[in-house]
Amino acid sequence: MRTNRHRFWLVARRDSQLFSIARTAIGATYGNASPGDEDAKREVMQTLAAMIYGQDGHFFVVDYDGRNLVVPRQTQPINQNWIGLRDINDVSITSEFIRQARWGGEYHSHLWFKPTTGEQAEMGTDVIGLQNWQWALGTGIFIVDIRATVATRVRVLSSVSSAPLSILARLPRQH
C-alpha cells in the first residue's frame, strides 16, 4: 500500500514539474495568440517537439478531432487521425486523452511502445487541455521506470534506516 502511494506521489510530482516547464516554455506564445493563429501554433508545436527528457520522455499533442500534432520520438504519425486508437488490450488511448483535456481526470493507464526497447509497456499518461486551440497536451511515464525508481529508493531507505542499528551492534559493550 505504501509503495503504491509512493508511486502515485512520484508521478504526480514529476508531471506537475514537467507541465510547469512546458507552460513556461509556451506561455507567452500561447497566451498572446488567437485561436486561429497558425504561426503561433507552429511555434508551440516546434517548442514542444524539442522538449524531450530522459531516455523515453517527451510531450505530445493531439487536437480534439484526434489529429496527432506532436510526437517527437515517433514522427511518422504526425497529422494522422488517431481518434479510434486502442492498445492491444482494447483500452482507448486518443479518445481518453481528449476527454481528459476537456474535462480533467485521473492518470490514464495504457500500453505504448517504449522508445528505448521498442516493446509495448504499461504507461501512465497525464493530459491537460489547451482550450483556446482545442489541443490535448500530454506526457507520461512508463510504469516499469516508476517501479525501478521506487525499488532504488526503498533499497536506499532500508540501508539508511538499518545503519544506526549496525553501528550500535559494533560498539563495545560496557558492563
Image (cartoon, rainbow, N blue to C red):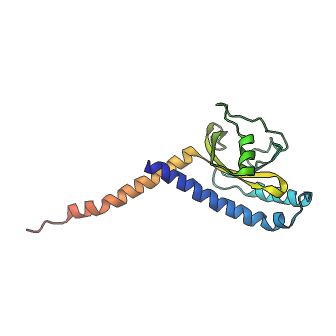
The answer to whether residue 114 is seen in the rendering is: yes
Residue depicted at x 75% and y 46%:
98
Instruction: Judge left or right: residue 144 versus residue 166.
Output: right
**x%, y% of residue 86?**
71, 34
**x%, y% of residue 49?**
77, 54
Total labels: the figure holds 0
Q: Nearer the viewer, residue 54 or 78?
A: 78
- Figure quadrant of residue 158: bottom left
Placement of 36 over or under 148, stated as above or below: below
Q: Nearer the viewer, residue 26 or 115?
A: 26
Instruction: Judge left or right: residue 12 versus residue 136.
Output: left
Q: Nearer the viewer, residue 110 or 59?
A: 110
Placement of 33 over or under 138, stated as above or below: below
Placement of 77 over or under 162, stated as above or below: above
Placement of 87 over or under 51, stated as above or below: above
**x%, y% of residue 28?**
81, 68
Looking at the image, the residue that sits furthest to the left is 175
Residue depicted at x 71% and y 42%:
96
* Placement of the C terminus among the 4 image quadrants: bottom left
